[in-house]
Image (spheres, rainbow, N blue to C red):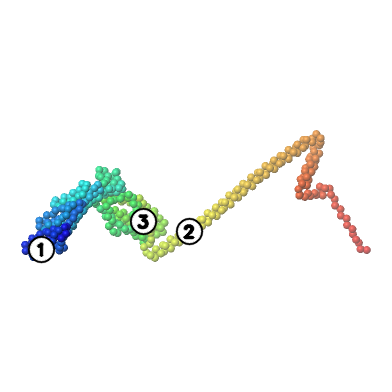
Amino acid sequence: MKKVEYVRLIDANNGKIRVEKGEQMVFPTPYEYILDPEGKLTAINLKVFEYIKILDSATGEVRVEQGEQVIYLGPTEEKLQGKGKQPAIEIDDETAVKLRNKKTGAQELIQRKGLFFPKAEEEILEVQKMIRLADYECLILKTKSGELEFYYGSDEKRGDKPRSFFIPPHYETYNLLWSKGRRRESRSLQITRIDCRAQFMNFEFNCRTSDNVELVLEGTFFWQVEDVEKMVRMTGDTTGDICNHARSRFIALVSKVTLKVFMESFNQIAAQAQAKDDDFYSKRGCAIHTLEVTRYQCADQSTATILEQIIQETTNRMNRLSQQDSANEINMAKLEGEIAQENHRSNLIKVKNTHDIMIASNQGLAEAEKVKTFLDATEKSVKDLNTRVGLWNVLRKSETVSSVAQGNSRLYFTPQDVNLSIETKETRMFDQ
C-alpha cells in the first residue's frame, strides 16, 4: 500500500476489525478478509476550507473533522450519508447561513465573517444572500406565528424595517400565486418580490353583441399596485381578479350594442368599463390607468370573412375619399392661385391707370402752362386774342410736321386741309 492508502480487515472467527495503513505490505491471516468491497481505501485529504462528518456505527456518535489533515476511517466509522468532503461556507457582508440544531430543533442565523464549519448536531438549512430591495419593490415575510410582515424599498413606506436584510430564523418568504396567460387560465405565476411600478398586462376573452355576433377581444391593462397590504388581504390572485372582472364588464356592455356600434365605439366602451369600476380595483389596492382594446375578431369563421370584407370595403372607401380630398385640395390650391393672380393683375391695372392719369395730368398742366406763357408773351405785340390763338395753332402744326419729318411716319392731309381740287379730263372718240 502507498502512504495514503489503508485497508480494513475483519476476522471471521471473532468479528474483530483491524486497520492497516501504508506504506507497508499487509498479509491477512487465514480467517481474515477485506471488509470494504473496494479493497484498499484512500485516505481522506481535507484542505483548509473543507470538512467531513464521520459516523461511528458502533456508538452512533457523529464527529466533524476540519482541514488541513488526512483522515483514516476507523474500524466502525463511515462517511455520514455518503456526503464525503464538503466545502466550508464563506460568510461575509452579503452571505449568511441558517442552521437547525437537530438536538433542540432551534434555528439560528450565522453572520460571523469567515469560514463556517457546522458542528456534528447542526444542519445547514440555507445559505442566504442578503436581500436588497429597490425603491419600487416589496417583499412579504411570514413569521413563525403566521403573521405577515411587509418590507419596502421606498423610504416613505419602509418605516422602521430595514431595506437590506437576511431572512430571520423561523421566517419564510410569502409568495403570491397569480394567474398567467392571455386568458388567465393557469394560476402558476409565482411572485416573490412585488413590483409596485405601473406595468402592462394583456387579456383575451369572448363576448357577444346584441345582434348575436360572437367576438374575441384582445386588449391591455396599464395598471399598478398601490397598496400591497390591502391587496394581500382582499385577494390571492390579483391578475385573475382584474381580468375576470373586466371580462364581466365587457360582456355586459357589449351585449347591449350591435356589431356596427361596437366597431365605431369600442374604445369608448372600454373607457366606460373602466370608469364605473374604480371601487372594485381600489378595494384590492390596485389602480387601472388605461384599459384599451387592441384587436377584435369574430369567433365564427364565416362571420369573420364577412367582417373582413366589410373592413376591406370601408378601407377602400376611406382610401377613395382620401384620394378625392387630395384632388380637391389640389384644385382648391390651383383656384386660389388663379384668384390671387387675377387680384394682382387687377391691382396692376389700377396702378397703371393711376400712373397714366398722373402722366396725362402733368402733360396737360405743362401744355396749359406753355399756352398761357405764349399768350401772355405775345399780348403786347398782338392785341387780338383770336389772332394769338391762331398763331399758336400754326406753331403747333409746324412742330407736328417737324416731328413727323424726323421719323419714318407718313402724314396724310384731307383735301380741305390743303385746299386741293382734282379735275379729270377725258377725250372721247366718236365713230364717224
Q: Is residue 15 visible?
A: yes
Q: Amino acid at mark 1?
A: Pro
Residues at marks 3 and 1 touching, judged by CB atoms closer than 8 Å: no
The quadrant of the rendering that contains the N terminus is bottom left
- Say which residue label 1 marks: 28
Q: Quadrant of residue 73?
A: bottom left
Return the residue nearer the eye: 176 or 242: 176
**Residue 216: horizontal and vertical position, in percent?**
36, 60
Mark before the other along the chain sequence, 2 or 3: 3
The label number, if any, that marks residue 319 in the structure image: 2
- Say which residue label 3 marks: 219
Label 2 and label 3: CA atoms lie apart by: 27 Å
Mark before the other along the chain sequence, 2 or 1: 1
Q: Residue furthest left?
A: 14
**Residue 148: horizontal and vertical position, in percent?**
23, 49
- Density class for disc 2 (Cα within 10 Å; few <14, some 14-19, many ≥20) is few
Label 3 and label 1: CA atoms lie apart by: 82 Å
**Residue 39: horizontal and vertical position, in percent?**
15, 63
Q: Amino acid at mark 2?
A: Asn
Q: Residue placed at 41% from the left, 62% from the top? A: 307
SS at mark 2? Answer: helix
Q: Residue furthest top?
A: 380
Mark before the other along the chain sequence, 3 or 1: 1
Q: Amino acid at mark 3?
A: Gly
Return the residue nearer the eye: 58 or 133: 58
